[in-house]
Amino acid sequence: MSALVASGGLTACVGSFDPATDARSPVAPRVQAMVDANREYPRWAEFPRAVEPLPEPMAIAAQVNTLRITSGALAGEVSRIDWQTTQDPAAFAAEVQARIDAVPVAPVTAETLAEIEDFVRRTRERGRAPPPVDRR
């Protein structure tokens, strides 16, 4: 029974590897042409040959050693950083909120949506052209 379920699951996946292009789409012919053009994978013979010689094992070992040294130096610099966090997330959030609350808010930032819409309405009224002048 489990083999039947597994094989049924595998046959359901087969359709996802060969999706059909929606023929009603205006770009369907272009998509299908691109899919058909790129359906085959390149062969090993099509890859360019390496023209540069491979690095010597001693050069690779020197680069690895340099990476280890710089990694150690970076770890030392990171360990000296004062991260200023606590282990309690709630206390940290309260401390951050207190620092934010201590900074005064600009009056423009504290305006409500109604105040902003009223300002926009007044500005639009001021921007209207005056009525035409009677030239008679």
Image (tube, helix red, strand yellow):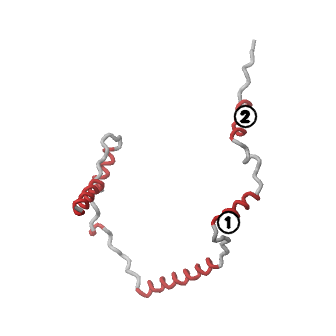
Q: Quadrant of residue 127?
A: top right
Q: Alpha-carbon distance for marks 2 and 1?
A: 45 Å
Q: Is residue 32 left or right of residue 73?
A: left
Disc 2: CA contacts within 10 A as few (<14), some (14-19) or many (>=20): few
Q: Is residue 112 left or right of residue 4?
A: right
Residue highlighted by disc 2: 123
Instruction: Report x, y in % for residue 124.
Output: 70, 32
Q: Nearer the viewer, residue 20 or 67?
A: 20
Q: Amino acid at mark 1?
A: Ala
Q: Nearer the viewer, residue 128 or 87?
A: 87
Circle 2/circle 1 CB separation < 8 Å = no
Pick out the residue farthest to the bottom.
58
Q: Amino acid at mark 2?
A: Thr
Task: Tell me, for residue 77, which label it has, or none.
Answer: none
Residue drawn where x is 31% and y is 68% of the image: 47
* Dot 2: element: helix
Instruction: Report x, y in % for residue 57.
Output: 41, 86
Q: Quadrant of residue 70?
A: bottom right
Residue highlighted by disc 1: 91
* Dot 1: element: helix
- Check the image and report above or below for 34 versus 135: below
How many discs mark residues in the rendered view?
Answer: 2
Q: Nearer the viewer, residue 73 or 17?
A: 17
Question: Of marks 2 and 1, which one's residue comes earlier in the chain?
Answer: 1
Instruction: Report x, y in % for residue 118.
Output: 72, 35
Q: In the image, which is nearer the foreground, mark 2 or mark 1?
A: 1
Q: Quadrant of residue 27?
A: top left
Residue drawn where x is 70% and y is 38% of the image: 114
